């Protein structure tokens, strides 16, 4: 449907990426621990809104480029494969962290400001835009009738999965009544497992034949 392929792999990859600790997760955990689950969810909603901005902007930009020819679409996919392999190398070479990324206490803020904080943290991060440009096209067929629509659909699926994870993280952190994070060993092996998945995905793309 919509020219999308390997949807289960896309969902799995998206879930792994959302679970990986990062600035968004730390913001949600900190706000939930200091102000309760509602504050954490406000941050999550802001992050989700920022993600949608990246998705829509990328889809519009991609549609102008990719509507020109199948060759242009193939070039984007190959560049994306190289970027995914670069990310995989970083994940595979990651080392255990011993509390350096523990969230710091923050002053209480109104929910609307927490939302804005989450939004700006995400929308002003150019790596997020680059990620969507590199990752999402891998799951869109070169003969897709509407590549921009397929891009938005996949982006929305990724964002919904991310929001579900962020909401669960906010509630869990608030109920625990302390700043929690993944065990360093678990985080390390999760990074490596995701890196291995990305290596496979990048090689699969690089060796695939376009129809």
Image (cartoon, helix red, strand yellow):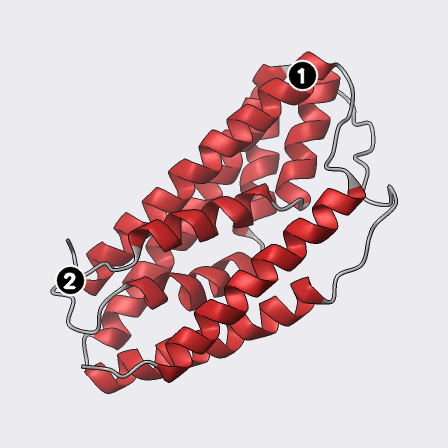
Q: Where is residue 70 in the image (x, y as percent from the top left)?
A: 21, 82
Residue at 58% over, 55% down: 125
Task: Give me the C-alpha separation between circle 1 and circle 2.
Answer: 42 Å
Q: Position of residue 62 (x, y in %)?
A: 30, 68
* Residue 109 is at least partly visible in this image: no
Counting other residues with Cα less than 10 Å from the Cα at mark 1, is it few (<14), some (14-19), or many (20 or more)? many
Direction from residue 30 to residue 144 in the image, left or right: left
Q: CB of mark 1 within 8 Å of CB of mark 2? A: no
Q: Element at badge 1?
A: helix
Residue named by callout 2: 146
Residue farthest along the bottom direction in this orientation = 71
Residue named by callout 1: 174
* Residue 98 is at least partly visible in this image: yes
Count of all numbered marks drawn on residues in the image: 2
Query: Which corner quadrant of the image does residue 98 belong to?
Result: top right
Please determine whether, in this image, residue 7 is positioned above or below residue 72: above
């Amino acid at each position: 449907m919509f020219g999308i392929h390997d949807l289960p792999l896309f969902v799995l990859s998206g879930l792994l990426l959302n679970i990986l600790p990062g600035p968004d997760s730390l913001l949600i955990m900190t706000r939930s621990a200091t102000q309760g689950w509602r504050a954490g969810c406000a941050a999550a909603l802001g992050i989700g809104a920022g993600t949608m901005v990246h998705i829509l902007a990328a889809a519009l930009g991609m549609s102008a480029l990719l509507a020109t020819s199948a060759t242009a679409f193939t070039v984007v996919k190959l560049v994306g494969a190289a970027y995914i392999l670069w990310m995989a190398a970083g994940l595979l070479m990651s080392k255990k962290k011993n509390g350096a990324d523990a969230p710091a206490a923050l002053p209480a803020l109104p929910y609307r400001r927490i939302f804005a904080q989450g939004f700006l943290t995400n929308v002003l991060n150019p790596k997020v835009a680059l990620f969507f440009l590199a990752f999402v096209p891998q799951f869109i067929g070169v003969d897709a009738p509407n590549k921009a629509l397929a891009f938005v659909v996949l982006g929305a699926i990724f964002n919904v999965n991310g929001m579900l994870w962020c909401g669960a993280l906010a509630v869990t952190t608030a109920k625990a009544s302390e700043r929690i994070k993944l065990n360093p060993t678990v985080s390390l092996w999760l990074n490596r497992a995701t890196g291995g998945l990305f290596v496979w995905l990048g090689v699969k793309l690089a060796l695939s034949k376009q129809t």
